[in-house]
Image (cartoon, rainbow, N blue to C red):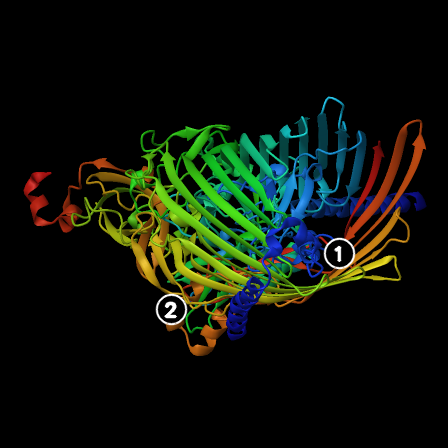
Amino acid sequence: MKTHFYRLFFIVLFWPIAVIAQEQNEAPYINNQEAALNRTDWVPTLLNASGNVLLNMVVFNGNAFGWTLRGNSHTMMSVDGIIWDTPLKKLRPDELYTGLQNELYSVGMRMNGILSEQPYSTYANVFYKTAQVQDSKPSISVNTSFGNTMHSNLLRVHYNSGLQSSGWIRSLGMVVQQAPPGYAPLGYKQSTGIAFSTDKKYSNKILLGFSLIWNYNNQSKAATTVGEMYSLAGSKIYSPNWGWYNQQLYYPNTKQTNTPVFSVRFQKEWSAATTFKMTNAMTLGNQSETSLDWTKTNDPRPDYYKYLPSYVVDTNLRNALFEWYLQHPEQMQIQFDKLAKINQASNDKQSFYIINQQNASLFLLRGAAVWEHIISPTMYLKIGTNYALDQIHNTNSIKDLLGGKFYYNYNGWMNDDGQVASFQNDIQHPDRKIKQGEQWGADYAMRAIQMHAWTQFNKEGPKIETAIALGYGLQGMQRIGYNQNGLFPMSSKGISELLLSPSFDIQYQWLYKFSGRLYLRSSFFAQWLPMSESNAYINSELNSMASPFSLMETYKGLDFSWMYRAPSLKLEFSAYWNKKENQSVQKMFYQDAFSKFVNGMVGNIISEAGGVEATLETNLLSNIQIAFVSNLQQFVFANNPEYKLVNVNDLQPMASGILYLKNLPASRSPGLVNALSLNYQPVNSFRLGLNLLYAQMRPVLMDYFRRSNVVKNSLDALSWNQIQAPNFLPNAFIGNAFLSKSLQHKSANKIYKWTASINVRNLFNNNLPVFAYEQTRFDYLHFNANKYAVKYLMDQGITYSIRLQLQVQ
Amino acid sequence: MKNKSHILTIIVIATGCLFSTAACFKQSAKAGISTQFGDSLISIQRLRKLHTMGGVEMIGQSMFVEGTVVANDEHDNIYKSIFVQDKTGAIAIQLDGLSLYQSFPIGALLRINLHNLLLSDYRRMVQLVGAVDSSSGSLVTTGIPSPLFPKFIKTVSENNPVSPLIVTYKNLGDSLQGRLIQVSGVEFSAVDTGQTYADKKNKLGMSRSLKFCSGGTIYMRTSGYADFAGVRTPAGNGIVVGIYSVFNAEKQLLLRDTNDILLNGKRCTGAAWLQNLPQKVAKGSN
């Protein structure tokens, strides 16, 4: 496959040069605007099909399989030109807009590596804005939905003032989501959000706008577990992540977001050809996560490997344990009352079990500016700049002492070396007893500053359109420690040196227009990316030491697409290739052979993705729209990278070598997905849709460290092959359907539009593992791959959401 | 005449009913002891008698014992076991779990369901275990898995008083296995005085000899994982409380923690002492 792509690359590279040369030999009257537009051989530009069918299918239906495209790990959202991505690891950017996506206005989607009319962005592929300034009518809408998932109970009220005579337009949306504990099988969710924006046009040339989006969200987290527990529970909605505490449902693993986002937009039209847009945004808020934590006591998780029947060697005992779980299913949940009893029974009521809360206090400042100039009807230039200033202050606090009176401020995730100071989180205040609500553990902040400037030039010709974009950026990152821990007293407190890393990106794209229906497009990109906190530091929670594998990641690729556009038929066929180099990964885990916690670091990882994508859109019988997409992709490691294991206590090397990852899957995205979408719309007010997806070649996310030279040298060839070989999930099929009906009537000057819809997901109630991964903990003593088994997250099964909306205009 | 025989018959019948009713009461009194763990409470002494040294016996009947926890893993000198005793004896119970002291603190009265558990011994130390495996050629025992603790063990009450049995060297025998005992007039041998209880750094267990002034030696066995492994043995003479154990023919004492040691008296004097002393101490430096 690689050879074919290299051939395609050279064809793509040299063909346009030949064609451009030919064009240049023709009469140069293309610089005359009027003449250019009147040329009969001028092929119109490519009009995008209704959205990007493939990307739509991935974003809105692909979650069930972990389906991503072109080796990307996730969809990046841009709002008003601002991307809330950060090199700092404790930010969950998607949650800034939880539940409020419907308050945003979608302005486009694009595949990674493809330039579009959207402002140039290295990462983003889904674009929104907070306001629409146009001749919109005033309206109020009330939207309520309910269903059987924790995301489906929702009440939304939206008000749009319409463009007023004063030039102002305002919109206000409020969203409340409520799925209390016990309502939905997999957890709970309580979310309240508001989205307010106001814009004003001054003299039709200046637009000024403000937006405030405030989202408060509190929800439980999904939990994976081993297949044995699903079998024992006899249910795909089993979760080990809850229990009963004082006769109430209790979820220890939760996440919260409380992040108001305030943005100011400015736009000025200097002339009909020149526009300047700028957005500045800021968020001051908190994101937190809670989890059950424990020290010097038994593991409280019901699916801990030692509690499973498979762990018991003796057949009689194993059967007895199996029967015991069947007769006492409550034993497969966390026994909070028992944990509280242990805490209360301890000497001086010291807690051994707590609910810990990790807090990230956010201060994020962002800005994006774009200057656009239409040089001629066929050429335009954009120059833009982005900046970001991020500071995230990370602390821990005790949310619940579970019946005890205090918890010692000790680090439980280190190796007991017999030194009293080692387990102190704060050696200046040793042995501190922490009460409920008080702060403990690591206290540090991460700061990142980014500047990025870019330019994009587009030129249209009668047959060829070209675009080129260049970007350059600089990023600085540092750690500020506020307390001094016993493991790293010299490097835990204080301000670390600023780690500077530049970035550079280039993208080139051309489009050949055979006719108004047939197009050929190719693009090439190359990026040199700055470091992130995850790969720059060994363990930023404990110290400011840099990772030995922190190198500048590079990412390059090319794309080749053939498109056919006709009124009733749209076809697109793409082939692509991309390569990432100098990636690194870091994980802390317990290494059984050393009986110690270690930091595992992998560096110089090279991965390659290649694939073909095909989409077809057509109409059948005039009121049935059919879309078919097919995606065949391979995302693999291209080398055997290096690794190192160091002792978490003192970072002394314990093992190193290479990992045999070459040609193994580098992600969990399926290798082949075929999807069919049918939409039946006999009249405007009725719509019935069905999406059917079938995924094959679904890799289980791999643990890198077990595929090391040390393990290979310890085993015979057959055993080694069994461990090294990747695991795959069964092929999966899912069907999603929706139905909507709307009614409209007029009264006085108002139009009342009623819409009712129902969405059903996983229509056929298939047993679907959504997510599966190999645990990092591995039996390095006896190399039993089943000892720490693969963990899964199963799909809930058939879910529905019924929505009612009233819009008054 | 006829009336008298009727009366006699009634008296006989009534007497018969009286006795049979009493028997019913007695039966129901026995039934009142029955629990969800079966209806046969036996003593630990009787339980121990079911075992033949070197063998393995599975308890196939529905029986239970009641005993008070006298030692656990709180200070890590005992690993994956607890010791329970009643008035008749004591036994070690192997449990496949950690931090057992949190669920089975000292003084807790436990009711143990013996059905399907096994009796075995390790170097002549009798123990109750969950499973045995001899496929490797040697006997490997497994404790009761922690999720099954509620199936086999019920806590009846907590904070029951625990008093050690005061014994002399001559009393030390297999009937005391697992019991909390107190010995007095003991001191560490000169070689073992001032030494650490075990090798904490390398996590190696060690035995330190405790000499009786009246003659005889018992070995204090300490695990290298014990939290007091690095503490030095005292130089004095006095009282030691611990769990009596055996390792083949060797008599051992397992310490729960250093609070059970009170060796602050003068070291031994008398004829028996002469056998214990190295030369330098005999010159009266103490």
A809 vs B142, nearest the viewer: A809
**Disc assigned to residue A432:** none
> Distance from label 1 to label 2 (Cα)?
42 Å
On the rendered structure, is A202 left or right of A400?
right
Question: From where the camera sits, is residue B36 visible?
Answer: no
Q: Name the residue furthest top.
A: A166
Q: Position of residue B165 (x, y in %)?
A: 38, 42
Three-letter amino acid code of the residue under disc 1? Asn
Tell which residue pokes out farthest to the left in this image: B283
Q: How many numbered dots are placed on residues in this image?
A: 2
Q: Residues within 10 Å of mark 1 (few under 14, many from 20)?
A: many
Chain under numbered label 2: A
Q: Which residue in the structure is indicated by mark 2? A: A709
Quarter of the image containing the C terminus of chain A? Answer: top right
Where in the figure is residue A93, as x and y percent of width and height? 56, 41
Numbered disc 1: secondary structure: loop
| Residue assigned mark 1 | A762
Disc 1: which chain? A
User: In the image, is A627 to the left or to the right of B76?
Assistant: right
Secondary element type, mark 2: helix
The residue closer to the viewer here, B53 or A514, is: A514
Q: Give yes or no for contact between labels 1 and 2 (Cβ–Cβ under 8 Å).
A: no
Up-down relation of residue A552 to residue A264 (above or below): below
User: Could you tell me which quadrant the N terminus of chain A lies in?
Assistant: bottom right
Residue A440, image quadrant: top left
Where residue B111 appears, as percent x and y from the top left, is 56, 47
